[in-house]
């Protein structure tokens, strides 16, 4: 299973970024795809998750109403639209895949998101 993140960068507080996770047709059609993040000096934490049908979606409480996870089957890509960014959203964002909710078995290499105040 291959997961390739892109779209990270430097943005000012209040700004937006869209992260992309490119994968295969088989993966997006049969796995849960999730986004995690890891801030400097902190443990990796769950951000959002979507299942293969796009009907089971979950968010970590601090990003609800600001982040939106979605998928484009034709492009084999899962997106994380991040609006209203704050410096607390700074970190490396990872795409992950697993066979069911709460289970992650595969990880991407990560993409850096930096939000300046």
Image (cartoon, rainbow, N blue to C red):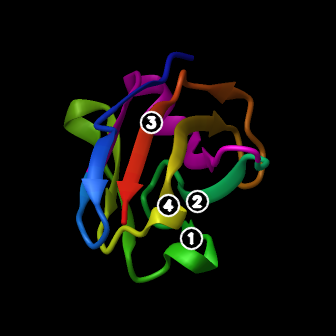
Q: Nearer the viewer, mark 3 or mark 2?
A: 3
| 111 w.r.t. 88: above or below | above
| 43 w.r.t. 59: above or below | above
Name which quarter of the figure residue 98 lies in: top right
Q: Which residue is mark 1?
A: 59
Q: Is residue 23 magenta?
A: yes
N-terminal-most mark, 3 or 1 = 1
Q: Which residues are magenta?
A: 18-41
| 18 w.r.t. 20: above or below | below
Density class for disc 2 (Cα within 10 Å; few <14, some 14-19, many ≥20) is many
Mark 2 vs mark 4, CA separation in Å: 10 Å
Q: Is mark 1 in CB contact (under 8 Å) with mark 2?
A: yes
Q: Which residue is mark 4?
A: 89
Residue 59 position, x and y percent, is 56, 70
Q: Is residue 71 left or right of residue 52?
A: left
- Work out whether residue 90 or residue 97 is closer to the camera in this orientation and state it: 90
Mark 3 vs mark 2, CA separation in Å: 15 Å
Per the rendering, the mark at residue 112 is 3
Q: Nearer the viewer, mark 2 or mark 4?
A: 4
Q: Which residue is mark 2?
A: 47
Point 58% across, 39% down: residue: 31
């Amino acid at each position: 299973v291959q997961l390739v993140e892109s779209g990270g960068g430097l943005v000012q507080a209040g700004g937006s970024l869209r992260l992309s996770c490119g994968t295969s047709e088989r993966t997006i059609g049969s796995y849960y795809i999730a986004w995690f993040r890891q801030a400097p000096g902190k443990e990796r934490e769950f951000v959002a998750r979507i299942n293969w049908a796009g009907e089971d979606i979950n968010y970590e409480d601090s990003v609800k109403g600001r982040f939106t996870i979605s998928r484009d089957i034709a492009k084999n890509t899962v997106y994380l639209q991040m609006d209203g960014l704050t410096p607390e959203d700074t970190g490396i964002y990872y795409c992950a895949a697993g066979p069911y909710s709460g289970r992650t078995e595969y990880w991407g290499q990560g993409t850096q998101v930096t939000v300046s105040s």
